[in-house]
Amino acid sequence: MFLPFSMFAAGGADHWSFFSLLGLDHHYSHVVMAAIATIAIAYLSLRVHRAYDGASEDEVLVPERGLSLRNVIELVVQGLYGLFYGILGEKTDRYFYLLASVFLFIFVNNLMGIVPGFLPATDNINTNIPIAVIVFVFYNLEGIREHGWKNYAKHFMGPVAWLAPLMVIIEVIGHIVRPVSLSLRLFGNMTGDHIVLGLFSQFAPVFVPIIFMGLGLFVSFVQAFVFTLLSSIYISLAVSHDH
């Protein structure tokens, strides 16, 4: 009954996991965890796709009875779409697939840290940096596509010509800091959450960890939400014609 908690206690605050038994240290286990998360998301997506495939319009519009996988996915997707629409407006359809994929990937990886014996891939900076770099490259390319490279470059120069050299430096630093801050914020919060859960599971392996598992679920959602929200804001700023 209390085996899951004793697994946390056995590892304490370090990075023990099932992968340690296979001789796979923490620096490589995040690759396996990211692969597991990707497979899980692909499987769920396939299940939902099959639920819609061949269904009539009435069957698509009417939700299933009870708490089904399809209803949960629809609720999440509708919530995310409404969030992004408030930021991106009519351009939401173009960017929704990337942003929703980023959210689901980060959220599922974060949840792995709650499962005893597993590690969240997002508590490794090597997982977070590629996601942040993808967002960074994407919003800059979209800015260039929307405005043309000359007009997009003018965004870095500011409104006053004689301040352009200084503004370019400030803007470039500000843009470079964005993927760094996205990566470090996610890394720090997920590492801290996993350490706290490990410590309290070691000192009080019965009942107490349940509280911190609930807290971990909340942190997992918030961190995925913040990462995706900031990503959508960066895209909106890049493609906006208001500045």
Image (cartoon, rainbow, N blue to C red):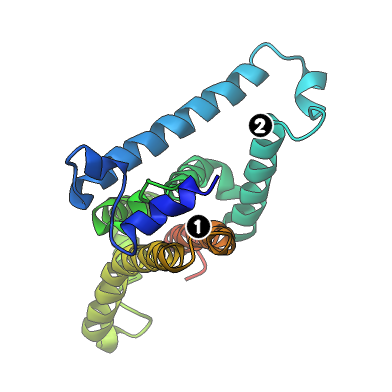
Q: Is residue 131 visible?
A: yes
Q: Please rate how many residues cluster around mark 1, counting C-alpha atoms within 10 Å: few if below 14, some from 14 to 19, many from 20.
A: many
In the depicted structure, whether residue 219 falls above or below residue 138: below
Quadrant that contains the N terminus: top right
Which quadrant of the structure image shows residue 54?
top right
Residue drawn at point x = 54 percent, y = 62 percent: 222
**Tag 2 secondary structure:** helix
Q: Which residue is mark 1?
A: 220
Question: Alpha carbon of mark 1 to alpha carbon of mark 2: how far?
Answer: 20 Å
Q: Horizontally, is 110 left or right of 78 in the view?
A: left
In the depicted view, which residue is nearer to us: 35 or 143?
Answer: 35
Rendered location of residue 174, percent (x, y)? 31, 75
Rendered location of residue 135, percent (x, y)? 36, 53
Q: Which residue is mark 2?
A: 69
Indicate which disc residue 75 carries.
none
In the depicted view, which residue is nearer to us: 20 or 99?
Answer: 20
Count of numbered badges drawn on the protein: 2
Residue drawn at point x = 79 percent, y = 30 percent: 63
Q: Is residue 135 visible?
A: no
Q: Horizontally, is 237 left or right of 48 in the view?
A: left
Which quadrant of the structure image shows residue 105?
top left
Q: Looking at this rendering, what residue extends furthest in the top direction?
A: 54
Q: Horizontally, is 100 left or right of 149 in the view?
A: right
Q: Who comes first in sequence, dot 1 or dot 2? A: 2
In the depicted structure, whether residue 34 falls above or below residue 123: above
In the depicted structure, whether residue 13 falls above or below residue 135: below
Amino acid type shown at disc 2:
Leu
Rendered location of residue 197, percent (x, y)? 45, 63
Amino acid type shown at disc 1:
Ser
Residue drawn at point x = 63 percent, y = 15 percent: 53
